[in-house]
Amino acid sequence: QVQLVESGGGLAQAGGSLRLSCAASGSIFSINAMGWYRQVPGKQRVPIATITSGGSTNYADSVKGRFTISRDNAKNTVYLQMNSLRPEDTGVYYCNMEILGIGLRYPAWGQGTQVTVSS
């Protein structure tokens, strides 16, 4: 059983910054890709930023140049530094990790953390 625990969400003003963290615990052999997704009411969850086990990153066009994803493999943790926040960044942010166990490979999700950006 693997648990992903997120932290760092909250309220920020436009132009401000927030940093999200997501730590995995449990039976983990290794972790492949990690990522952050955003969901707003009535819409599907969409990818915001992803990072491979080798450190290659990919970002949604709307956050390029403002958000930075990083990972600490020793801590099984992924981060999302969000700068120059905009009201349209508001939503519930979920972390995702591709977990590798003994003979297993499966996606795991965090519980979600609310980010609200006021104008």
Image: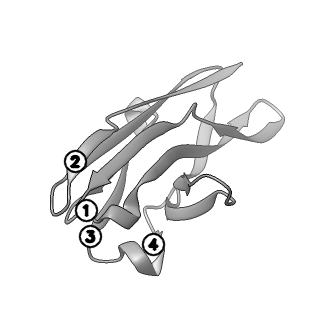
Q: Is residue 21 left or right of residue 27?
A: left
Using the image, tell me which numbered label, if any, was put on residue 85.
Answer: 1
The residue tagged with tag 4: helix, strand or loop? strand
Label whose residue precedes the other's in the sequence (2 or 3): 2
- The residue labelled by disc 3 is 66
Q: Position of residue 76 (x, y in %)?
A: 46, 34
Residue 37: name its quadrant.
bottom right
Q: CA distance from mark 3 to mark 4?
A: 10 Å
Q: Are marks 2 and 1 in contact (CB under 8 Å)?
A: yes
Residue depicted at 26% across the width and 70% down the height: 66
Using the image, tell me which numbered label, if any, was put on residue 59.
Answer: 4
Nearer mark to the viewer, of 2 and 4: 2
Q: Amino acid at mark 1?
A: Leu
Q: Amino acid at mark 4?
A: Tyr
**Colouring:** one colour
- The residue labelled by disc 2 is 12
Q: CA distance from mark 1 to mark 4?
A: 15 Å
Residue ranking furthest to the front? 119
Residue depicted at 72% across the width and 18% down the height: 1
Label 4, residues with CA under 10 Å away: few <14, some 14-19, many ≥20: some
Q: CA distance from mark 2 to mark 3?
A: 15 Å
Q: Are marks 3 and 4 in contact (CB under 8 Å)?
A: no
Label whose residue precedes the other's in the sequence (1 or 4): 4
Q: CA distance from mark 3 to mark 1?
A: 8 Å
Q: Position of residue 73 (x, y in %)?
A: 42, 40
Nearer mark to the viewer, of 2 and 3: 2
Q: Amino acid at mark 2?
A: Ala
